[in-house]
Amino acid sequence: MENKCGCWAVLKRGVVKGTCNSNNNNNNNNSSSTKGSLPKISLVYDKVILLTGLHWFTGSGRSLATETRYLNASNRELAAHHEAEPGDPDPFPLKKKDFRQLLQFSFQELKSATGNFRPDSILGEGGFGFVFKGWIEENGTAPAKPGTGITVAVKSLKPDALQGHREWVAEVDFLGQLHHPNLVKLHGYCIEDDQRLLVYEFLTRGSLENHLFRRSLPLPWSSRIKIALGAAKGLAFLHEGHEPVIYRDFKTSNILLDVDYNAKLSDFGLAKAGPRGDNTHVSTRVVGTYGYAAPEYVMTGHLTSKSDVFSFGVVLLEILTGRRSMDKKRPSGEQNLVAWARPYLADKRKLYQLVDPRLELNYSINGVQKVAQIAYYCLSRDPKSRPTMDETVKGLTPLQYLNDLAILSYHSHSFQPAWRKKISDGTTRQLTVTRTKLIRSLPINTGKQHCK
C-alpha cells in the first residue's frame, strides 16, 4: 500500500527493531525514533500536558477530568503488558492484508483537524492514550473547519508504550478488514516518526457505561434491549466469520452508541484470532478487565469464543441491574455483580430484585425473565454450557417487540374492587400498596408464566 511517510514497514517488524525516518515531515516535531528503543518525547502529549496545565491555572476551558464518554480504555490488569503471546516470536506482527480502504493521514493533518490537540477537544483518556474530537473533509484526509465535513474521533498512542503499539497494530489489523454495522468504523491511521494515531467515526452518544452509570436519567428499557441486541450481533459477527475473532475485552465502556442508540463495538487492541482446524482454544497471555473476564480464561490462559460469551453475560447483568460489574463502594457481598446476582437469576420470586430500581415499573415483565435467563446461561461456570452468540442474538431479537410493561399490570390491579376498602363513613379509599407487594403479585413472581 502506498504510504506517505515511508514507515509502513515498521508495522511488520515492530518499532523496536529499526528506525523510521519520515519523508513527509510537515510538522515541527523534532523527535525521531532511535534504533532499539522508543523515543521518550511525543509532541501530542507535551502539548496536551502544557495546555492543560495552563487551562487549570487560568481557570478556563475543561480539564482532563472531562467526562470520559468515548472509547474508554480498558482496566487491563490481568497480566503484565510486556509479556509476549505464546508461540509468537515477533511481539508486533502485522499480517499482510489489503488496507487500501483505510485513509493514511499525516500528523500535520490530524493536528489541524483537532485544533492542535486542544484540551477542550479531548473526548476521553485511558491506558492507550487521549482521544480527541476533530473534523476532516468528506472525500479525503484534509482537515475541515469545526462543524463541517465529517466528525471523527482521533486516538493517539502514548509515548513509551510498547504494549500500546501492539494494540495499535491489532486495531489496524482487525478493523482494517472487518466491516459490520455493529463495529465502529476505522477511517484511517497515522504513523509518522514516533506518532501513532487512529481515526474513527465519531459516535454522538458516547459509551454505554456513561448512560448506565453516569447519567442522571435512566436508560429506557427499550433502549437497553436494542443496545444488548446490537452488541450481541457485533460479537456474533466476529465469532462466526470465515476467520473467527475473539474480542477479549467486551464491556460497557467499549460499547459505543450513535444518535439512534445503535451499538458499535470499539477498541480492538486486545482482539485475537480464534482457534483454527481441530484446535479448541488459543493459548495466550491473560489480559482483559477484572470483573468481565471468564474464570476459566483467567485460570488457564485458554481462550475461546465462550470467553466473550461470559463477558456478554456480565454486561447483560449490568444492563438489567444498573450496577457495575465490580463496585467496591457496595457491601462486601454485593461488590462482585455476578456473585451477587447469580442466586436471583435462578429464582423467579426474587428476580424482580435485580431490576434497576431507577426504571421503576417501566420494563417488560417477560423481557426481564428472558434477559435473566440468557444471562444465567452466558455466565455458566462450564464454558460448554454457554450459548453461542448467534443463539444469544436469536434469544434477544423477540424482546424488542414486547409491550407487557409492569406499570400496565400495576394499573390493571389498582382499579379492581378487591383493591378498595369500604370504611365507616360510606366513602371508599384506595389502599396504599408498596412496590414490593405489588411486584410480588405480578405474573413474573406467581409462577403463571415460565421462561421459554
Image: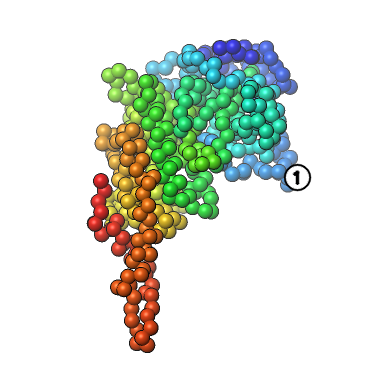
Total tally of numbered discs in the picture: 1
425, above or below 302, in the image: below
- Can residue 338 be seen here? The reply is no
Q: Name the quarter where the N terminus is drawn.
A: top right
Q: On the rendered structure, is 411 left or right of 94?
A: left
Q: Residue 242's image quarter?
A: top left
Q: Position of residue 152 (x, y in %)?
A: 60, 31
Toward which corner of the image does residue 293 lie, by quadrant?
top left
Q: Nearer the viewer, residue 248 or 80?
A: 248
Crowding at label 1, few (<14), some or many (≥20) Cα neighbours within 10 Å? few
Rendering coords of residue 310 (x, y %): 35, 37
* Amino acid under disc 1: Thr
Residue lying at 57% horizontally and 14% vertically, measured from the top left: 8
* Left/right of residue 15 with respect to residue 302 in the rendered view: right
Q: Is residue 315 left or right of residue 1?
A: left
Query: From where the camera sits, is residue 446 visible?
Result: yes
* Front residue (pair 313, 390): 390
Colour setup of the view = rainbow
Query: Which element type, helix, strand or loop, lies under badge 1?
Result: helix
